Amino acid sequence: MQRARNVHRVTVPPVTSQSSTRDSDRASALGRVSASSTELSLAGLSVSDLVAEYGSPLHVVDMADLDRNAAAALAPFRDAGRGADVYSSYKTNPIPGVLGRLHDAGIGAEAISAYEVWLALELGVPPERIIYNGPAKSQASLRQAAELGVELVNANSLGDLRQMIAAADSVGSVMRVGIRISLPHMWGGQFGLPSTSSDVAVSTRLAVDSPHVDLIGLHFHSGFGLRDDAAVTMHMQAVLAFCDELRLDTGFHPEVIDLGGSLTVPTVISESRPSPLSRLANRVRRRPEPAPLSSGDIITIAQASRLAWELVTTHFNSHDLPAPRLVLEPGRSLTGDTQLMFTTALDIEDSGSGDEAIRTVILDAGVELAEPMRGGGHATLNTTRPDARPRRHRLVGPRADAADVLVSEIELPTVERGDILAVLDTGAYFVPFSTASTFPRPAVLGLEDGVVSTLRRREDLTRFTEFDPS
Ligand SMILES: Cc1ncc(COP(=O)(O)O)c(C=O)c1O
């Protein structure tokens, strides 16, 4: 498969006179919506011209931010192995152009379905850089993983482990496996074996004794956000205590500890700093850097990686045991802040008066495309009228359905019909979880050095009936 790399030079000129609002205009724009308000631009590209050319809604990925995030995430590991190796969670952002870029930077693949294993192989990821997880692995994909020598397949349950053994047996290979454990502070349910279950020891002994698998790892994806040093330390202490108990019980000591994902996005409003893209927008407007959106001190992938490595190394050295190799599978913390989404106000409706006044904005992106926006966690800008008078808005989607509400209350520069909003940090769980039952899904562009390329084309209406017999 070819990676989508057809570079499209945007024909629009960089924002010039439109953006050079005179001081008098700016002053008046504070009091009323002014036709001469400054439109926000992105790396010198006019947002309205981008949307005119590629349609709305529209996702834009900052390719340089992908490179930066990947290099930062891998730095501790590359620094004489004093950190975790890094695998990108495919389900978080499955755009081939994004994944290919992360792989070019040295990041491995974490797949949770037969499709994702296939995609990683299509993208040229060597099997020994693929980790296969998830509660729904097909037999065919397990046989393929065994044959190809995928780096690590994590068993989600005792039944899953039995399937893995059967698959390896059927192709005559030895599969490298891990067991996914759910500690009390982590996601439970369908995700891994509860640490208190007798199935843990049963699975461990079964894997150790089987000639068809080589048990090398234990997997611990928290599922609940690990925001800071304290949360990572607490998680690691619980992981290490569990490893000690399992060793005492079964004699098994892991070669690999896979910590999964769960590091938070440093840029989503509820979590911390503004994103590179919002900084870009502010630079273009010659505004000072905005203050951090909250005071939380979010741990980065690199900091978590170093901290986990130090805790693991110190712990096992004190037991005269080799320290296991560490693995991280970041999703949101790797790609979340590398993407934004533009969405257009199709219509507005005002209601209430005085303090109760609120403007409802009907956007062309609703919960089908932007479900993670619910609750208002994502910083949102009015790119068309950034200087308009702020007022309360309610952001709803186009689906003609009372449940299509993205944000029930948000203060924004007054939005008028046709304005384009930018939703920041849409690089995790927006594209993969979009459903689009009656409006087509948007294009995804890659932005690099002021030039955009198409990473995913906008859908057209024919997709809705594409697979129906005529
Ligand atoms: C096994 C596993 N690894 C990695 C991830 C990525 O998680 P996050 O986006 O929180 O980093 C997930 C997400 O659910 C997961 O289940």
Image (cartoon, rainbow, N blue to C red):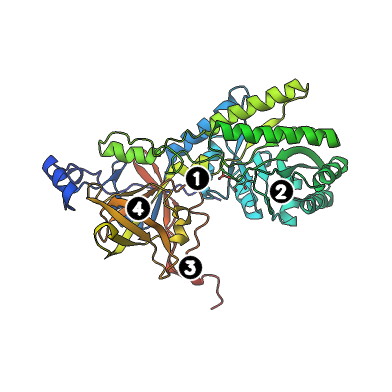
Q: Amino acid at mark 1?
A: Val
Foreground mark, 3 or 1?
3
Q: Amino acid at mark 4?
A: Ile
CA gap, disc 3 and disc 2: 32 Å
The answer as to whether callout 4 falls within 8 Å of ligand 1 is no
Instruction: Provide the residue designation for mark 1.
Output: 98
**Helix, strand or loop at disc 4?**
strand
The answer to whether marks 1 and 2 mark residues whose Cβ atoms lie closer than 8 Å is: no
Q: Amino acid at mark 2?
A: Gly
Q: Is residue 214 left or right of residue 456?
A: right
The answer to whether marks 4 and 2 mark residues whose Cβ atoms lie closer than 8 Å is: no
Q: Which mark is residue 437?
A: 3
CA gap, disc 3 and disc 1: 25 Å
Instruction: Provide the residue designation for mark 2.
Output: 192
Pick whichever of labels 3 and 2 is earlier in the sequence: 2
Instruction: Provide the residue designation for mark 4.
Output: 410
Foreground mark, 3 or 4?
4
CA gap, disc 4 and disc 2: 38 Å
Query: Residue, x 42% and y 35% (percent of image)?
Result: 295
Q: Which mark is residue 257?
A: none
Q: Amino acid at mark 3?
A: Ser
Q: Is residue 43 left or right of residue 168?
A: left
Q: Is residue 122 left or right of residue 458?
A: right
CA gap, disc 1 and disc 4: 30 Å
For label 1, the crowd category at 10 Å Cα-Cα, with few meaning under 14, some 14 to 19 and many 20 or more, is many
**Helix, strand or loop at disc 2?**
loop
Pick whichever of labels 1 and 4 is earlier in the sequence: 1
Say if 162 sits above or below 303 in the image: below
